[in-house]
Image (tube, grey):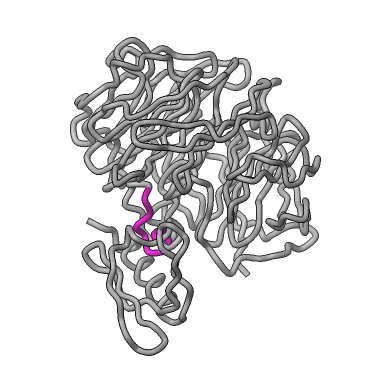
Amino acid sequence: MKTTATILLSLCLTLAVQAEIRIWKDASGTHEIKAELVGVQGGKVTLKRENGTTITLPVTSLSKADQALLGGGSGGSGAAAGDWPQWRGPNRDDVSTETGLLKKWPASGPKRAWVSQEAGLGYSGFAVSGGKIYTMGLYDAEEKVVCLDAATGKKVWDSFVGAIYKNKWGDGPRCTPTVAGGKVYAIGGNGDLVCLDAATGKQDWSKSLVKDLGGKVQGWGYTESPLVEGDLVIVTPGGGQGAIAALSTKSGKVEWQTKDVTENAQYSSIIPIDHGGQRQYVQLLMKTILGVSKEGKVLWQTDFPGQTAVIPTPIYSDGQVYVTAGYGVGCKAVKLGAGSAEEVYANKNMENHHGGVVLVNGLLYGHSNNGGWTCQDFKTGEVVWQDKGVGKGAVAYADGMLYCQSENDGTIALVETSKKGWNMVSSFKLEAQTSQRAKDGRIWTHPVVVGGKLYLRDQEFISCYDVKG
C-alpha cells in the first residue's frame, strides 16, 4: 500500500499538472498533444485538449519523461511522482523531469538545507522515495543500508548487509539501493544481496551473488544497483552459472540465469527497454553487450572491447543502444533488429570512465578522458563540442541544465545544455568533505536532483541543497 506521504505527493503533482495545459509527447517522440491532465487510473491517462475534447490512452504510450511525471516511468520500480527510487532515477538515465529549478545560483551556491554525518563510508548513491533517502555505508567492519529522513537528514534506521569490502580506493559499498513495492533491495561490495522492509529495515531475505549464484568479486567489488521488475529482482552475478540472474522479490528464489552467457560481472547496471513489442534487459560486460528477455533468454549480443573495468550504464533510445567505457576503449552504438544488433558507430569520442553520460534531445553529455566535458551526437557519434570545464567528474540533468561535479575538489557546476558549447552559469564547492577518504579515492558518488533538492555525498557526509526557484 502507498504511504500517506506518497499519496499526498502524487496528489500535489496531479493538481499542479492539471492546472496547466502542456505538451505531451508519445513514446516515439514524433507526435504531440497539447492538453491538460484530467486524471490517471488503471494504467491509463486522460487528457483534455484546448477545444474541450478528451482523450484516454495507456500511460506507457507516452514519452519516458511524461511517464515519469505521472509516476509511471518504464524503470519498473513503480515510482511515485517526485521519487527517485533507484540508480539514475525512475528511467535509469539520470534525467530528472523536474521544472521550476534555479537557472542561476548565488555566488556562494544554493542554500544548504542540511548535512548528515550518519551515512557511513563508501560510494553508494541515493534512492529517494516516500520522503526517505536510502543509501549504503560502512560502519567499522559492517556494510549497511541506511535510511534517512529527506526533510532533516536524520537517520531513521540502518540494516546489516554484509562484511566489509576492502579496497585501496576506499572501503565499503558502491551500490545504490532500489526501492519498490515497500521493499529495499541492495548489494554489498562482496556481493551480498538483501531485501529489506522500507519502513523498518527488517530483512526479508538475503542471497550471495558469489556463493548462491556462482559469481566472482571483481577488483573494485560489486557495484551494480539491482533492477526490480514486477515480481523479479534482476542482477549480474557473472560467472559459470550465468552472467545475469532473476530472483523472486518475495523469497529470493532464483527464477532463471543466463547459462549461455557466463562472463564475469563488471560494474555496470542493467537497464530495461521495450523494443519490437518486447520487454528486455540490456547489460554491458567486459567483452559483450547483450539483451535478455523477461524469461531469461538471450535475445541478442554483440562484442565490446572492454579493458580493465567497464562501468557506465547503457543508454537506449529509438532502437539504438549506446555504451561507453574508459581505459582507452571509447564508445559504441548498435541498432537493434529482430534478434540482432548492428553496429552504428564505434569511436573514442566519448571515453567515459565512471561519471556517467546523459542523453538530452538527441545529444549526449558527459566527461571523456579524451578531451574533457563532451557533447556528442547520439545518432552519429560525432563530437559537437568539448571543454575542460571543471575537470573529470559525474553528471546529472534537470530542467534544461547539467549538474557537473568535479571528482577532485567537489566543485558543482550548473551548465546549460546547448549545441554551442560549455556555458557554466554558476558553481560552488561542496562544503562538507571527509577526512576519511582513501588516498586514492575521490568524490565519486553521483549528484541527484529530485524534489527541488540537490543531494551530494563525500563518504560519511550527505549534503542537501535547495535548488528550487
Between 27 and 9, the one lying in front of the other is: 27
Q: Position of residue 339 (x, y in %)?
A: 34, 31
Q: Position of residue 208 (x, y in %)?
A: 32, 19
Quadrant containing the N terminus in the rendered view: bottom left
Is residue 70 located in the magenta-colored stretch of the structure? yes
Between 104 and 281, the one lying in front of the other is: 281
Location of residue 106 by image quarter: bottom right
Residue drawn at point x = 31 percent, y = 52 percent:
78
Q: Position of residue 231 (x, y in %)?
A: 22, 40
Between 328 and 148, the one lying in front of the other is: 328
Residue drawn at point x = 32 percent, y = 78 percent:
38
Q: Position of residue 138 (x, y in %)?
A: 49, 27
Q: Is residue 462 left or right of residue 92?
A: right
Q: Is residue 413 left or right of residue 314?
A: right
Location of residue 56 by image quarter: bottom left
Residue drawn at point x = 29 percent, y = 21 percent:
258
Compared to residue 340, the image places residue 242 above or below, namely above
Is residue 166 located in the magenta-colored stretch of the structure? no
Q: Which residues are magenta?
A: 67-74
